[in-house]
């Protein structure tokens, strides 16, 4: 619910008074409804680096971090006020219900005029942040639930050269509005002062992290050989196998330090972190599962890979070879056809180019086909996440058979690897990425994940080389 409240900054005692009045209004609504309301206050600020805020205020807390450096956008969300952990085949349905229930309790202060001006920006409104594991069930030792969603108390966003602080606060019939006003006021003043600070690497810590040990005990190539035999026997068309290595460092891994390094190394990827307060799942993903702005959907088919060249001429040669490679084109086409079919079954009309383009990253390049369509107002983002996850780019084809084979061949838990991570707001805007090129950090231990798609014509040595290339890029970001 949008409320007509005129303040969008907190710079004076008058602004503090307006904040108090808005919170009093929220308390009145809580009394009238007999239900706790959530006061959501969005404030414009100078551009603040959300990673700096995360580092200063959210160490050891549940959080969600997302940054697209080339796009000039980043957000840090922490200190959940409402959260839910869900498992089972209906997790996306229950996640949709959770988001709808949360948004129904929100009272949002942004004035109508300001809302119209900013509603197409990322994180203009309060958001729910979520992570899903690859499979809908988790083992007893799994670090993350099959679905985790939360509404944060603090949502710090940067869009180009502007900033926005959103604070969500539960207000019930006995809420002490004066105390809450002062708490919010003081914390926002502290956060605003960080606009003059820039995140920096602690070089001494990084140099000590360079003393590490890698353990690689997972037989990736054996799985590829077995998968190729099954593909030849027409048991399935494609299987994506992941590989994992374990890294042990003398000092505990520092999540924010690694994120800063990753965003410098991979400005063209989505750098992310999801934390349960003990372990963090971080990475730099090139793959967008979906992006929704004003009911316009974009999703990506990203499959088929080659390394980058050391020289301009070598790079062009490798790119040309990728675009003409029948095996890579076949692998890519499976993903395009799957996504298009899933959207058609939802009653949508996807459009996309007949041939893929190149998505060129620092050390690897992929075949890439963006797929777009308009969405009806009654289609919830969670319905799309449920339909698209997992795509053949991270599982295989047919999907059910591929998932069964992943459990057979991979001797480790994927957890959040290759699964949807993202956010959505009450207007239906959303963005989810696929958690690839990623690592689970747990104290001195990090588990790094990468995968490769196996189709007819795949070569085990070449697929292993591709996986090692992806792991090396991630390792550089961590240590």
Image (cartoon, rainbow, N blue to C red):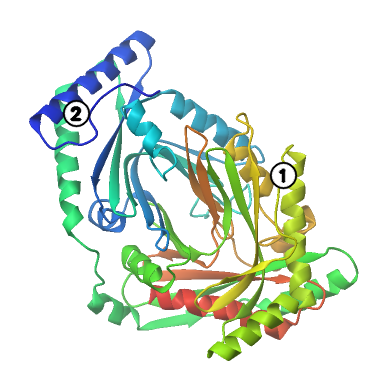
Viewport quadrant of the C terminus: bottom left
Crowding around mark 2 (Cα neighbors within 10 Å: few <14, some 14 to 19, many 20+) is some
Q: Where is residue 399, by image quadrant?
A: bottom right
The residue that disc 1 covers is 343
42 shown above or below 308: above
The reply to whether residue 253 is in sight is: no
Task: Look at 75% across and 54% down and name the residue there.
Answer: 338
The residue that disc 2 covers is 180
State the residue in front, 297 or 302.
Answer: 297
Task: Look at 63% across and 47% down and name the residue there.
Answer: 136
Residue 9 x %, y %: 20, 36
| Circle 1 SS class | helix
Q: Where is residue 108, by image quadrant?
A: top left
Spot the residue most to the right.
233
Mark 1 against mark 2, which lies toward the viewer?
1
The reply to whether residue 100 is in sight is: yes
Residue 229 x %, y %: 85, 74
Spot the residue most to the left.
13
In this picture, residue 101 sits left or right of residue 250: right
């Amino acid at each position: 619910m949008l409320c007509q409240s005129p303040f969008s900054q907190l710079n004076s005692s008058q602004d503090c008074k307006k904040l108090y009045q808005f919170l009093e209004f929220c308390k009145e609504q809580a009394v009238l409804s007999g239900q706790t309301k959530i006061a959501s206050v969005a404030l414009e600020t100078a551009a603040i680096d959300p990673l700096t805020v995360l580092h200063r205020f959210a160490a050891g807390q549940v959080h969600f971090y997302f940054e697209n450096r080339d796009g000039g956008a980043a957000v840090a969300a922490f200190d959940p006020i409402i959260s839910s952990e869900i498992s089972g085949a209906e997790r996306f349905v229950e996640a949709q219900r959770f988001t709808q229930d949360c948004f129904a309790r929100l009272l949002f202060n942004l004035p109508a005029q300001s809302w119209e001006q900013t509603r197409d920006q990322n994180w203009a409104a309060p958001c729910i942040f979520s992570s899903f594991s690859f499979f809908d069930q988790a083992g007893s030792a799994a670090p993350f639930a099959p679905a985790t969603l939360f509404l944060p108390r603090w949502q710090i966003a940067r869009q180009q050269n502007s900033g926005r602080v959103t604070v969500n606060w539960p207000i019930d019939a006995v809420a002490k509005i004066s105390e809450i006003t002062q708490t919010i006021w003081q914390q926002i003043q502290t956060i605003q002062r960080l606009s003059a600070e820039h995140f920096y690497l602690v070089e001494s810590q990084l140099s000590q992290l360079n003393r590490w040990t890698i353990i690689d005990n997972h037989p990736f190539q054996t799985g590829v050989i077995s998968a190729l035999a099954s593909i030849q026997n027409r048991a399935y068309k494609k299987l994506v196998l992941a590989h994992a290595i374990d890294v042990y460092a003398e000092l505990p891994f520092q999540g924010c330090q690694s994120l800063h390094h990753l965003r410098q190394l991979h400005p063209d990827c989505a750098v992310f972190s999801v934390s349960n307060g003990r372990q963090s799942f971080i990475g730099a993903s090139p793959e967008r599962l979906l992006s929704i702005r004003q009911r316009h959907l974009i999703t990506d088919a990203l499959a088929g890979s080659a390394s980058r060249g050391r020289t301009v001429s070598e790079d062009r040669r490798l790119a040309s070879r990728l675009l003409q490679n029948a095996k890579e084109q076949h692998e890519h086409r499976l993903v395009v056809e799957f996504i298009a079919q899933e959207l058609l079954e939802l009653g949508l009309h996807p459009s996309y180019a007949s041939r893929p383009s190149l998505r060129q990253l620092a050390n690897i390049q992929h075949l890439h086909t963006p797929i777009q369509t308009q969405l009806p107002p009654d289609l919830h983002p969670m319905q799309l996440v449920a339909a698209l996850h997992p795509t053949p780019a991270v599982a295989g084809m047919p999907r059910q058979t591929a998932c069964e084979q992943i459990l057979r061949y991979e001797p480790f838990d994927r957890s959040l690897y290759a699964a949807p991570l993202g956010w959505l707001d009450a207007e239906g805007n959303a963005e989810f990425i696929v958690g690839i090129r990623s690592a689970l950090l747990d104290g001195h231990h990090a588990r790094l994940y990468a995968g490769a798609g196996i189709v007819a014509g795949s070569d085990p040595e070449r697929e292993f080389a591709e996986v090692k290339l992806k792991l090396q890029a991630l390792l550089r970001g961590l240590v």
